[in-house]
Each structure stands twice: as structure tokens, then as C-alpha cells.
Amino acid sequence: MDSNLINAAYLVAAVLFILGLKGLTSPRTAVRGNTLGAMGMLLAMVATLVDKQIVSFELIALGIAIGSVIGIIWAVKVQMTAMPQLVAAFNGFGGGASALVAGAAALMPGAIAGVPAIQVHVSSTLSAFIGAATLSGSLIAWAKLQGLLYWQPRGFAIRLCSTGSALVGVALGAWYVIHNEALWAFAALSVAALVYGLLLTVAVGGADMPVIIALLNSCSGLAAAATGFVLGNNVLIISGSLVGASGFILTQIMCKAMNRSLWDVLSGDLGEAAARNPQEDVYSGRTKSTSPEEVALLFETARIVTVVPGYGMAVAQAQHAVRDFANLLEARGAEVRYAIHPVAGRMPGHMNVLLAEADVPYDRLYDMDTVNPLFAETDVAIILGANDVVNPAARDEPGSPIYGMPILEVDKSQIVVVVKRSLSPGFAGIPNLLFTRNNTLMLFSDAKQAMQDVSREIREL
């Protein structure tokens, strides 16, 4: 087929990718953006298959069938609360696919027509290193999110091993580029990359997963772009670059939202907690517990209610109970808002996805910068499992490990109800001063059960 026509198809696909990313920047246009991106990928796949029949169409159809069956099973069985794990796995599969293509190029030198040998060798080295590291790192992230792995080594030793494996991988990659017949160097490079991805991710805490998922997504895009240079495929280069750049930008946004550097996240460094304020001393005699009956009475006269969802809502799968609760209040004339912190949950947009599943209107979701000035007019703010993202210590305590981290300023509401199963700390391991405020009430319960109990009591008023 005419190469100009193929390149034109790739150009249209690239434009659709860009428009798709643009659509994903807003909840209102997210569905359209996802559709445009899917259309771009379909066009790119068709153009590639028409242009280069690298393998038989029978094998391609078999691969599509196997992948479709796996995808359908996951789509049906995986709960919305498990989306972070699924995203982590998908990132890993993308990196692994890139590494496999690089390996095929190394085993069949000269098989890719029209691509200079030096470009194939350099690109396959980069693709193998980034892809293999993304694969192992994503599997570790998946295991942590799934609750299968709790190991989190810290300190100089793990950093030394991580840096050492990366340097070994770089050295082996340079050797392979210079002596491209040395396939042992390529294989060893891939192993070193797998070790590096494992060591890099294992030190990251579970609550930092939004950042690491965004970073791994960026790495999977970079691996795909490198694979595009291996194959001489323009659309793969463009799409991989878009994913890599957007993922890295998102990583930076997430780090800024946590007031931490990417290095601190990757090293598992949370700073030193203030030892002068043991948790039991901070909370002793200063927290006020409440009951669903008492909380229901608060909402009898509340005109503006702000819901602050956190990972506790996700764990309890309480999003539908929250929506029913909001419907009940709105039917009684109250205005219900949802305050979303950028790093709430276990992946970027986690709370948005869960609330969208429960059919919460997009216009009720407020980002941190928009909602913070509105808390002063909120009658009741109800927090569902969020912790450090609502801790006033980030604003008021210069000695706190999270000082300077942007938070949802829920303490400025008239009354704050915190729904938690216990007084356990967040990922920073420090007390939450919000729990001791005079306007804060603690409802110790599972988020879903609490919402159902409060809703029942409101109906009986």
C-alpha cells in the first residue's frame, strides 16, 4: 500500500490521540475523549496491518481473540475499587510487550527493512531496559495494592542496590550497542532492568501508589516510543511520547499535591515524625465520638453539606450508599458537594471513577482549589476515610512531616463528621489534629455501614 497513505492514516490517528487526551482533562468530555482515543488506536492498527504483514493474519486474529477473552473477563469480574491494581497491571503489560519486541529485534538483526542498524540497536536497548523495569515495577505495585505484599525496605542498602542495578543495566546496554552480536549482554541487561524495577518500586509505600502508577504509566509510554524507533513506526513513536509526557506531568502534579519530591516518594522517605506528640497523648480526652442517630440530627437543618471521600470509601465500596445519602439530603432541600483531593485514593482520579460509577453528577465534584474557599459556608462536612489530606497539621504545624502539603480545609466547616473505623494514622504515621477540634465528631464505623445507618435515621426523623 502507498506509504504516503499509510503516513496520512498515522497522522489522523495521532490527531485523534491528542484530541482524546484533551477530552480526558474534564469529566464532562471524558467519554468522548476515550472514544476518540480508541478510534485513533483502531485506525493505527488497521493501517499497520495493511502496511506490514509481519506475521500471518491467522496468528493476529488468534492474539486478538485471546486478548479479548482476557479483557472481557477482567472487565466483568474486576470491581471499581480494584481499578488501581488493574491499571498497574496494564502498565506492566505495556512495558513487557515493548521489551518482548525489543528482544525479537535483537534476535533477528536486519529483519526490519528501512531502519538503520544503529537505530535498531540503541532503541531496542532503551525499550528493553524501560519496558522490563516497568513490568517488574508494575507487578510489585499490583501486589502491594492487592494486599499481597507489605515489604517496604528503606535506607541506604536498598538505594545502593537499586542504583547499582540501574548502572549495571546501563553498562550492559552500552556494551550491546557497541558489540551487537553479544546477545548475552542484551539478556543480562533485561534481567538487570527487572531487578531495578523491583527494587525501585518495593520501597514505595502503599499510600504513594497514585504517584508511582502515574510514573509507571509514563515509563510504559516511553518504552512504546522506543519500540516505535525499533520498528520504524511513526504512530507508535507519537502515541508513546504522548503517554510518556502526560504521565510524567501527572506525576509532577501528584508530587506537588503531596508537597514531596519524586525522590522522596521513590525512596519511601516520609520525613521524621514529631516524636514529641505521641498519638495517644494527642487524642487522649480530646476526641468526641458520636452515633448515627446524632449525626442524622445534624443533617435535619443543614443546608450545605460537603462530602470528602477517601480510600476508606473505596475499601468499603460505599459509593452507592453515599449517592443514596446525597439523594436523601437533596430531596429535603440541602445542597450536596463532593470535595476531591488530587491524591485521595490509590490512583489518579480514583474518587472520581468511584463516584461516576454511582452516577454522581459531574458538576457536584469540586477540586481542591475550588472547594477550599467554600468550606466556610458548609454546615456539615462528612469525611469518609480520608486522613492526611484533611490534616490541619499540614497547614499549621511547621515541624510536621506533611507541613506544606495542600489539604482540603474541612476544619473551616461549621461541623465536621469523620467516619473512620479507628484512630489509626494515615500514611505519614502522625496524628490528625482535625480529630481533636471542637467542631469535629468521630463516627467509628465502616463507611458503607455508616452511610446506610445515617440514611436510615434521617428517614425516620
Image (tube, rainbow, N blue to C red):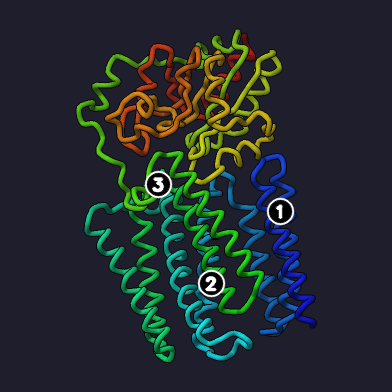
Q: Residues within 10 Å of mark 3 (few under 14, many from 20)?
A: some
The amino acid pointed to by label 3 is Gly
Query: Is residue 158 placed above or below 117 in the rendered structure?
Result: above
Query: Is residue 51 placed above or below 167 in the rendered structure?
Result: below
The amino acid pointed to by label 2 is Ala
Distance between mark 2 and mark 3 Cα atoms: 30 Å
Name the spot of residue 103 as percent of width and height, x first: 50, 81
Q: Residue at x 71, y 76 (%)?
A: 48
Q: Residue at x 63, y 58 (%)?
A: 73
Query: Is residue 81 placed above or below 435 in the rendered structure?
Result: below
Residue bearing mark 3 = 206
Name the spot of residue 333 as percent of width and height, x first: 69, 13
Name the spot of residue 270 as percent of width and height, x first: 31, 42
Q: Is residue 239 left or right of residue 182?
A: right
Query: Is residue 298 placed above or below 147 in the rendered structure?
Result: above
The amino acid pointed to by label 1 is Leu
Residue bearing mark 1 = 19
Q: Residue at x 24, y 31 (%)?
A: 274
Residue bearing mark 2 = 226
Q: Which mark is nearer the camera, 2 or 3? A: 2
Q: State the count of labels.
A: 3
Q: Is residue 176 left or right of residue 315?
A: left
Q: Residues within 10 Å of mark 2 (few under 14, many from 20)?
A: many
